[in-house]
Amino acid sequence: MELTLQDGVELMGYSRRDMPTPYGIVEYWRSRYEQVFPHLRAWSIGWGEPFCFRCGWLAPVDDTQATLAAVWNSASGWLDRAHLQDLALGGSNRPENLVLLCRQCHDIMDPCESREEALAYVNDGIPADGWWQLHTDTIFGPRANLSVTYKTKLMRDVYIRWVEYKRVIEAARHGDPQAIKRVEKILERVKANAESEGRDFSITIDDLQRSSPAGDGFSAL
């Protein structure tokens, strides 16, 4: 019988089916994070809202659910269960070898040969851009019931769009005529969508040009 890579991983005792839930990972770290993660978001906000262990981005879930377990488990798809020591390099699926990372932080994480190397990566993370947080909050809202696959696709698509919007708005702020024209069209579309939903939208190109590089009201785009 020909063995697949997944078969080989499971024979070594590292089956992904044995991974703890997101809340299982949180339960492990809640009483231990102080010695390991000096910049973890839990220091400032506690554990009531699911967050990325590296950049602190808050997952867009309903944090009023009945239990903390339900809140954190509903973040699956927004937050990945990421191995510290890579699974293929001898790591395990035990909670001490797992953290919760947003798609962006997980995607750029290189395979780590040791747990210490991975912890250094998590602790050296730059805090999530506040405008990115507002942008995702505005677009998603507390969509806890979406499938994991759909959440993953949404996050990737929204991140690509956000990076492009940020680039175009910055170019418009510096007077690029093509960028100004594009931002004006974006604002027209957003205003039309807002009006169709009975919402007010009064941001103009002048507002963006006077604002910070990310742009006031940028989350509304």
Image (spheres, helix red, strand yellow):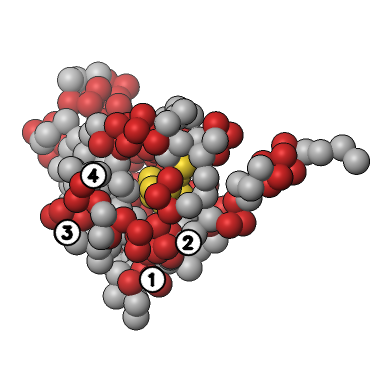
What's the amino acid at mark 2? Thr
In the picture shown, does residue 25 fall above or below 14? Answer: below
Q: Nearer the viewer, mark 4 or mark 3?
A: 4
The residue that label 2 is drawn on is 21
Judging from the image, what secondary structure is the residue with disc 3 in? helix
Q: Earlier along the polypeptide chain: callout 4 or callout 2?
A: 2
Q: Position of residue 117 (x, y in %)?
A: 36, 29
Report how far apart the C-alphas of labels 4 and 3 lie in the structure: 14 Å
What's the amino acid at mark 1? Ala
The residue that label 3 is drawn on is 45
Q: Are marks 2 and 1 in contact (CB under 8 Å)?
A: yes
Q: Are marks 3 and 2 in contact (CB under 8 Å)?
A: no
What's the amino acid at mark 4? Phe
Q: Position of residue 214 (x, y in %)?
A: 20, 35
Q: Is residue 8 left or right of residue 114?
A: right
Q: Is residue 184 visible?
A: no
Q: Position of residue 41 (x, y in %)?
A: 21, 51
Disc number placed over residue 174 in the picture, else none: none
Q: Nearer the viewer, residue 55 or 216?
A: 55
Q: Residues within 10 Å of mark 1 (few under 14, many from 20)?
A: some
Q: Nearer the viewer, mark 3 or mark 2?
A: 2
Toward the right, the furthest residue is 1
Q: Nearer the viewer, residue 131 or 107?
A: 107
The residue that label 4 is drawn on is 37
Q: Residues within 10 Å of mark 4 (few under 14, many from 20)?
A: some
Residue drawn 23% across the image and 44% down it = 37
In the picture shown, does residue 18 fall above or below 221? Answer: below
Q: Nearer the viewer, mark 4 or mark 1?
A: 4
Disc number placed over residue 69 in the picture, else none: 1
